[in-house]
Amino acid sequence: MRLLAPAHAIDCLRGALIDPARRERAVLVSLAVNLALWTLYGTIAKSSQGLHHDMTELIAWSRDLAWGYKHPPLAAAIVRVWFGAFPVAEWSYYLLAMLMPTITLWIVWRLSADYLAIEKRVVGLALLMLVPFFNFHALKFNVNTVLMPLWAVATFWFLRSYKSRSPVYAALAGAAAAACMLGKYWSVFLLAGLAVAALIDKRRMVYFRSAAPWITVAAGFAVIAPHLVWLYQQHFAPFGYAMYVHGAKPFAAAAYSALGYIAGSIGYVAIPVIIVLAAARPSRATIADMVWPADSERRLVAAAFWGPLLLPALGALVSGTEITSLWSMSAWALLPVLLLSPPAITLRDIDTCRILAAAVVVPLAMLIASPVLAILAQRGNPLPAAAQAGLLADEVARLWHAATPQPLRFVGGDGDLADGVVTYAAERPRALTDMPPPDAAELARSGMAIVCFAENAGCRSNASAQAATGRRTETEIVRNFLGFPGKPQRYTIFIVPPRP
């Protein structure tokens, strides 16, 4: 019975994680359990809501792989590979989403070995598990979550390269940096931050006189070159999209956005910071040593942490753009080192056990609460484009096959609806939204379905022009969940059968 006692179980977990012979396997098993718990939580808690549009949009992009879209292509390529091996289902998508923070945590575990004793490494890993970026927000797979492991490994390999000037780590750092840019252009702040960290370090001359930085640059350009060619061919259209959505803001709006970014980012990691301050009770001198260490090794880490985190606020002020604290989710891999590396920070065994217990209890508690959260979300009338996407896809397929025996290959109309139908449709059609259109002859031979909200006059007007020879159907969909009725939503569906 003692083995089942929570306190004893946590003590056994701590023992396994600090034991040199068992800790690597214990970490991998712990991360796998954490992955499974949060995947189950997401699958159940979000079962009444459907997949977020960011996720269905990536599936639509993955059906038309290119070297870029309004964002770089890496997230869509990952989705393409993933759903080549797994069924297109909500549980498998949440599993992919939670793999991003799980891989990040494992990289943090490896990275922290260069700076922290084993007890602090365990605490640092557990603290990150309490940050919402590593669970709740990570369940929405998009270009931001993809950056989490990429920023972590690029930082890890950069620090190794800087200290050792190893050609292998230099090449890996360059390739990882390019992968970050292929994930999201926001990664320019990581590259700039790491460059600043290298320039202000006392060992900069030794580093820049070595081959390491130039190997890094060469490897990075080799990886990203095809995308750069695509950008040039597209006249750098993604940058225009970014400025259209987030740019050209008054200075006051940009300043407010920058302050909100900093305050919100700090708020997201407040729990681990408060836990460390409460457990270690550091002096002001120790807190100063956390923020900006005296020794060169730890100061390089601090610079590599603060630069990528704070440079976006400066960039927002200079360029007049709005930013959000959610975009800082990839910037926290070095937080455990920053908080725990000062020699004056000491933690008792009981502190380690309590922090580990919190990291275990939170996902278990959320899993228990997940059915209730799903019902509450249903009663709150989730967005129909997501919640009803599967039912709408079934209705589109029914109308399509009533008109033609040919497979459904293209779906257009309202972007959110088309991407949702493409995601859930069994025949895996392609979306006619923000992708380059297929050849007109191919579209005529294949036909298409067009879906609109019935109240969206603009969408219906455009669809009528495209579907002059097609069939128009008005339908109403209600999604009930566990006996709780949903809100009815009317749709207009146009079916344009293939031409002979």
Image: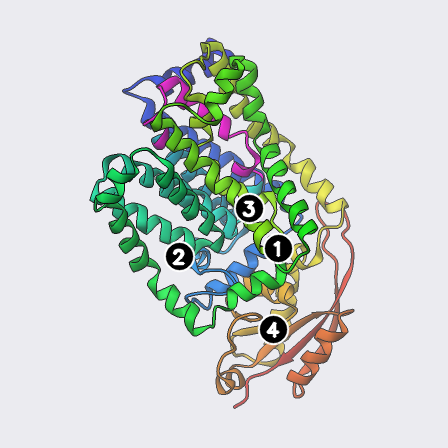
Dots 1, 3 in contact, CB < 8 A: no
Kind of residue at badge 2: Val
Whole-angstrom CA distance, mark 1 to mark 2, is: 37 Å
Provide the residue span drawn in magenta.
111-136
Q: Residue at x 42, y 59 (%)?
A: 77
The answer to whether residue 116 is left or right of residue 459 is left
Q: Secondary structure at mark 2?
A: helix
Which residue is pictured at 55% across the width and 18% down the height?
A: 277
What residue sits 47% from the left and 66% below the top? 63
- Which label was assigned to residue 187? none
- Residue 426 visible within the image: no
As measured in the structure, the alpha-carbon distance from the residue carrying label 1 to the one carrying label 3 is 10 Å
> Which residue appears at 65% of the width and 60% of the height?
391
**What residue is shown with label 1?**
320
Label 2 to label 3: alpha-carbon separation: 37 Å
Residue 262 in the image: above or below residue 464: above
- Badge 3 density bin: few <14, some 14–19, many ≥20, Cα 10 Å: few
Q: Amino acid at mark 4?
A: Gly
Left or right, 166 with respect to 195, comes to left
Q: Residues within 10 Å of mark 2 (few under 14, many from 20)?
A: few
Pointer 1 or 2: first along the chain: 2
In magenta segment, residue 124 = yes
- Secondary structure beneath dot 3 equals helix
Above or below, comparing residue 172 to residue 64 in the picture:
above
Seen as rendered, the residue at the extreme bottom is 500
Nearest the viewer among 212 and 106 is: 212
How far from the left and from the top, in percent, is residue 394? 62, 65
Which residue is label 2 attached to?
81
Circle 4 is placed at which residue position?
A: 412
- The disc labelled 3 sits on which kind of residue? Leu
Pair 4/3: label in front? 3
- Residue where numbered disc 3 is placed: 314
